[in-house]
Amino acid sequence: MFWKSIFSAKSGGEQIRTRFAPSPTGLFHIGNVRTALFNFLFAKKYNGKFILRIEDTDFERYKPEYESNIIETLKWLKLFWDEGPYKQSERLDIYAKYLRELLDSGDAFYCFHSKEAIEKERAEQIENKKAPAHHCEFKKIPLKDAEKHLTQEKALIRFRMPVDVEIAFHDLIRGEVRFNSNALEGDFSLAKAEGPNKFFPLYNFAVVIDDFEMGISHVIRGEDHISNTPKQILVQRALRIPMPQYAHLPLILGSDKSKLSKRHAAVSVAEYREAGYLPEALLNFIALLGWNPGTEREVFALEELASEFDLNKVQKSGAVFNTEKLDWLNGCYLRQMSIDQLAERAIPFLEKNKLITKGNYDLERVKKILTIEQPRLKKLGEIGDRRLSFFFKQPEYEPRLLIWRDMLFKDIVTSLKISLAALQGIMEIEFMRANLENVLLKEAERAKNKDKGRLLWPLRVALTGLEASPGPFEILEILGKIESIGRIEKAIKKLL
Ligand code: GLU
């Protein structure tokens, strides 16, 4: 197999080590799930290690809640890491050592341009339709002289971009990728001062050091990082450290084939979790984004994904995010569950929607309700909506919903009274589906033109307040005699 040959040729049987390296600058989103999942699957498939690294060097955008959101979401998804979380902010000494090396070798230099000056230069270049690039004059200053200024001025450390150098790498998804150094935005920054002579690493530098120090064999990340890769390779070359293998995953697109954004669908995982998607369904769905197992099969448990997964079968072109497919998959997972498992997952949603109170509900009754709903359920969040809430509280509805075909209000009153009398004749302990069906169907068959709807429609609406719902017999059993009779009486009052 193609991949196997690369694997043995390039990594010579070394341990596979992948990493997920999110920045805590926003809520965990669908793209993050895919990156984390593919790294996880790849590591598991080859018996390797999956490492979590928090890239927390952007102080301005960092928030502790974003960091806890990363940890919490990975745990919810059950994408457990083997090492970490490492935090870049706790590794400053490591970066300092490599910065020193780059400065001493002349591959890096101090830049004293202000942020404003750089922004101005960039704006002018864009205005003149030139690709933005900063070729820094400070690289001409001898290191010793530049260092004298470090205590007074805020500096950046930049990489000295070589002129006209070819940078090529083999991407495991995209094949050969080539760049020329002249097209790489000039002398890019490696670190910025956070105090006199104290430097904080920036992305393109820290990532190289960490991937090396952590022995990362494969960097699997979004295609939006592909233009960073040649810069990272240049840093590796300057430090004479080996290049990991790269795999850049295709963009995730919305239905109109533009990059997935809030306009198309929810992007933060928290929203999916709240809507009642199951983590296993979400992972299954996301695994299929851009990856095709090569068969018709679509439902895979996480362990099955790990053995089936193959970077070779990841497509190059963008992957369209299709919410209907996610709903369908989620429904499949919900139907596969036993009623006990479903109840365990559903109860927090019932509590959240205030349909039951924690520690104070009838579990058997909840299970009966779920048994009725399971074949239709797409997401657990639906458990709180109108379709199910009538089981827990009195329904609100317009009297005209009680009307069946050409029936008049007075006919409906009569019909409901017949149901009422029939139900009153059934003892509370016999209020069970089979008995109820038996008694009520007999009554229904006596209706005008043998039209059973004349009895059953008003009855069902009186119980549920809904145009569409499960049938009246199972609902009656769950509601019980007293509640059912109360609801029918209320319906009659609505019509008088
Ligand atoms: N912190 C970067 C991000 O969240 C990681 C990129 C990479 O995987 O190299 O996009």
Image (cartoon, rainbow, N blue to C red):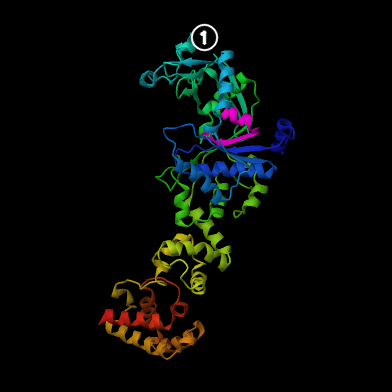
Residue at 39% from the left image edge and 77% from the top image edge: 460
Q: Look at the picture and state if 119 lies above or below 49.
A: above
| Residue under the image location 48 percent in, 49 percent down | 322
From what the image shows, is residue 160 above or below residue 257?
Answer: above
Q: Residue at x 58, y 45 (%)?
A: 37
Residue at 73% x, 31% y: name it: 9
**Residue 432 vs residue 176: left or right?**
left
Relative side of 340 to 467, left or right = right
Quarter of the C terminus within the rendering: bottom left
Residue 97, horizontal then vertical, whole percent: 59, 22
Frontmost residue, 403 versus 493: 493
191 up-or-down from 292: above or below: above
The quadrant holding residue 476 is: bottom left
Q: Amino acid at mark 1?
A: Lys
Locate residue 255, reporting x and y percent: 45, 46
Report the residue marked by disc 1.
144
